[in-house]
Image: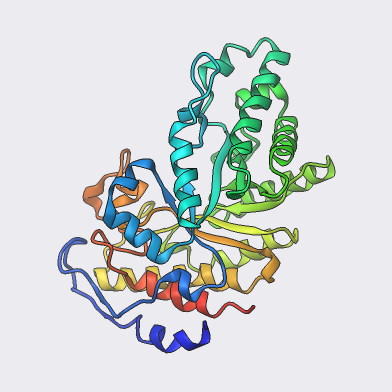
Amino acid sequence: MILSRRAAIAGALAFTGCGGCSAHDQPVVVGPVPPLKSVSGIPVGCCIETDNLRDSAFTGLLLRDFNQITPSYEMKMSICVRPDGSFNFGPADRLIAFAADKGMRLHGSALVWYKYQPAAFQALAGRRDAFERLYADWIGQMVGRTQGVASGWDVINEPIEHEEIRLRDSLWTRVLGPEEHMVMALDLATRADPGAVHFINEYDLERRPEKRLLFMKLIESLLKRGAKIGGIGTQTHIELADRGTIKPAIADLASFGLPLHISELDVSLGRWSVNRAPLGTKLSDQAAVAAEVADAFVALPSSQRYALTLWGLRDRDSWLQMPPFDPARGDLPLAFDDAGKPKPMAAALARSLASAPA
């Protein structure tokens, strides 16, 4: 089936640019692109929020092209853990029900993240036993309610400090221990849903080889401790200048033999640097960078290809269009434009995903 669609994909990368026009003028024209999920033997995911469920254009495009979802916020502590230590699972349950109703895989994210340290946990920081009980209750209840729907979970998210390249200091490390809190979380998640794949997830592993090295050392140490790491997530928030860095990063991470998840893919036109090339050139380069990601991923053994997830559906849905980023910069980091039309990046992904060996 995949082979029969290659002819439909072959011309999809042909497009016309608009010279030096602004990012939202005269959009680049791309030939027909088949639904990503229809050409891929690998699950293709997208992030989603409950507000998106009210947007029929969003859900229509999502269901056309994707067969896995990752909740952006609704399964994180910031939404779910109330100040008194009780839980609000309403928004999460709506997305769990949506995935189940539509026959989509669900990837949960994220159980333990340094950015969210709820007041209920802070109040127990001096009482380790009570802190541990709430930690276990949170993970057990959150993972338990997705059992049978979730294919995997980001259990530990972003454990490496970005600037100084060291293990992050957080409420979790201070109360439960730098690595101990990770071992505990992975064990709790596995007990709550032994059928799901439990991930440790990080960003900038392509751009920062020294960060990747420390991340890999952390994984080695956790595995020696008996941590139940089921998979490795690499967020893959990258930009045009990162071409050439992706393949080595994926090869390094794959060396553990564990399933890999491209967990939050987007390709910025200039998040960290200014690129004054014509829009058509930038979108062509964006497609090439996305193809490098997908090509390296599909070259992995089938047992290691967990999923490829885009961090947003349309350009206007991207986190790079929200504060503190300036939407006036015209960053267009996703595979579909503001109107939901496929860009060269979508065509490149379709072509690469269709080439995956069985």
Between 183 and 144, the one lying in front of the other is 144
- Residue in the image at 31% along x and 83% along y: 14
Counting from the top left corner in percent of width and height, residue 271 is at 36, 52
Where residue 183 sits in the image (x, y, percent)?
75, 36
Visible in this render: residue 331? Answer: no
Q: From the viewer's perspective, is residue 184 above or below residue 253?
A: above
Report the side of 180 relative to 200 (left or right). Answer: right
The chosen color scheme is: rainbow
Q: Which residue lies furthest to the front in this view?
A: 101
**Residue 148 point in image, percent of width and height:** 62, 48
Q: Is residue 61 above or below residue 10?
A: above
For the residue pair 129 and 182, the one nearer the viewer reads as: 129
Q: Which residue is drawn at 50% across and 57% down?
A: 103
| Towards the viewer: 132 or 319 | 132
Residue at 38% x, 68% y is 286
Q: In this orientation, does residue 209 appear? A: yes
Rendered view: 289 above or below 196: below
Picture coordinates of residue 190 (x, y %)?
Answer: 72, 41
The C terminus, quarter of image: bottom right
Look at 38% across and 65% down and name the residue there. 64
